[in-house]
Image: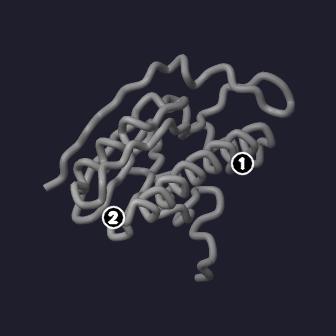
């Protein structure tokens, strides 16, 4: 059975980050201190709570769930689907914003993976998924244990069909 911890952040956090070409509204994920429990006391639920407590940034919705030896983080925000669509059509500003989003999610996921490994919690997997705000069944980005598994702009990196 999955447990779900839902955290809503102010949409105002999505505003005000500067891009190279000037002021821009970017969606990025940030992370504070990850306070993991001792490995002897750690469960998937306690790790999920620690992950939830550490996350912030410009996403309006951050949902942290658990499964068998896994923590999943769902991210969404108003306009993320439009951003992906504009980036996919070649809009240079949107491509830069999408890359900042993808880089921030990958960086946070990699940091958590490293922290889990350092704490001796190698058996717990961490995955982040960014979903379209207009249709939450449509995945735009998936990062598992620090590696991009799917990016709507690139498809499945490293996989040739």
The residue at 69%/26% (across/down) is: 17
Front residue of 140/119: it is: 119
Q: Give the residue number, with chain letter if any, for mark 2.
A: 124
Measure how far apart labels 1 and 2 are at the Cα level.
Answer: 37 Å
Farthest residue toward the right? 21
* Residue at 54% over, 48% down: 108
Q: Helix or strand or loop: what does disc 2 sit on? A: loop
Tell me if residue 30 can be seen: yes
Name the secondary structure under disc 1.
loop
Rendered image coloring scheme: one colour
Q: Residues within 10 Å of mark 1 (few under 14, many from 20)?
A: few
Q: Using the image as rendered, state which of residue 146 and residue 25 is in the foreground.
A: 146
Q: Is label 1 or label 2 in front?
A: 2
Quarter-of-image position of residue 82? top right
Q: Farthest bottom residue?
A: 161
Q: Is residue 41 left or right of residue 134?
A: left
- The image shows residue 24 at horizontal and vertical percentages of 73, 26
Q: Give the residue furthest to the left.
A: 1
What x and y, as percent, mark residue 126? 40, 59
Residue occupying the point 29% across, 34% down: 6
The residue at which mark 1 appears reads as 89
Above or below — where is 38 with respect to 16?
Answer: below
55 shown above or below 129: above
Horizontally, residue 124 falls left or right of residue 20, namely left
């Amino acid at each position: 059975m999955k447990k779900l911890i839902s955290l809503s952040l102010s949409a105002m956090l999505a505003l005000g980050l500067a891009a190279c070409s000037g002021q821009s509204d970017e969606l990025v994920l940030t992370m504070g201190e990850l306070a993991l429990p001792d490995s002897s006391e750690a469960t998937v639920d306690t790790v999920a709570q620690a992950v939830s407590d550490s996350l912030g940034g410009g996403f309006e919705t951050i949902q942290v769930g658990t499964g068998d030896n896994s923590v999943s983080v769902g991210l969404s925000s108003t306009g993320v689907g439009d951003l992906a669509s504009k980036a996919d059509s070649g809009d240079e500003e949107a491509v830069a914003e999408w890359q900042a989003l993808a880089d921030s999610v990958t960086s946070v996921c990699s940091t958590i993976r490293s922290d889990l490994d350092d704490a001796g919690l190698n058996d717990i997997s961490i995955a982040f998924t960014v979903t379209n705000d207009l249709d939450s069944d449509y995945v735009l980005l998936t990062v598992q244990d620090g590696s991009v598994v799917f990016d709507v702009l690139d498809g499945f990196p490293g996989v040739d069909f």
